[in-house]
Image: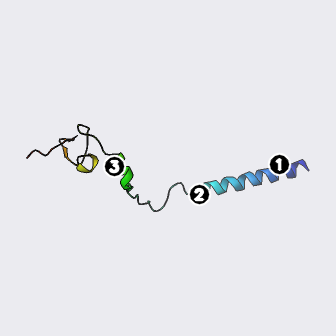
Amino acid sequence: MHCWKVTAVLLLCLLLLSQTHCTSLHDPQPRLTRQRRMTPFWRGVSLRPVGASCRDNSECITMLCRKNRCFLRTASE
């Protein structure tokens, strides 16, 4: 009787191990990432003040990014 229980447990463990061995660890198709869009409220809240570092005009409250800093005026003024 004890031998049947051990055999059943062993078969169950082998079955579970074979299931985990067959699963894929990565997606066959890479998922495309979509850039997040901000609502107008969050866009206004997240704008940077004059003198803060920036990468483009859309990050500054003045909409003027020059030399990686938010400027108050353009160079021509």
The reply, left or right, for residue 70 in relation to residue 16 is left
Secondary structure beneath disc 1?
helix
Secondary structure beneath disc 3?
helix
At x 23%, y 37%, the residue is 51
Q: Nearer the viewer, residue 25 or 70?
A: 70
Residue at mark 2 to residue at mark 1: CA–CA distance: 26 Å
Q: Residue lying farthest bottom? A: 29
The reply, left or right, for residue 34 in relation to residue 4 is left
Q: Mark 2 or mark 1: which is in front?
A: 2
Badge 1 or badge 3: first in the primary sequence = 1
Image location of residue 15, percent across then percent down: 71, 56
Q: Mark 2 or mark 3: which is in front?
A: 3
| Disc number placed over residue 23 in the picture, else none | 2
Marks 3 and 1: in contact by CB < 8 Å? no
Count every numbered label the image shows and give the total: 3
| Disc number placed over residue 6 in the picture, else none | 1
Image location of residue 7, percent across then percent down: 81, 52
| Disc number placed over residue 71 in the picture, else none | none
Badge 2 or badge 1: first in the primary sequence = 1
At x 53%, y 54%, the residue is 25
> The residue under label 3 is which amino acid type?
Gly
* Mark 2, other Cα within 10 Å: few <14 / some 14–19 / many ≥20: few
> The residue under label 1 is which amino acid type?
Val
* Mark 3, other Cα within 10 Å: few <14 / some 14–19 / many ≥20: few
Residue to which mark 3 is pinned: 44
Image location of residue 41, percent across then percent down: 38, 52
Badge 2 or badge 3: first in the primary sequence = 2
* Mark 1, other Cα within 10 Å: few <14 / some 14–19 / many ≥20: few
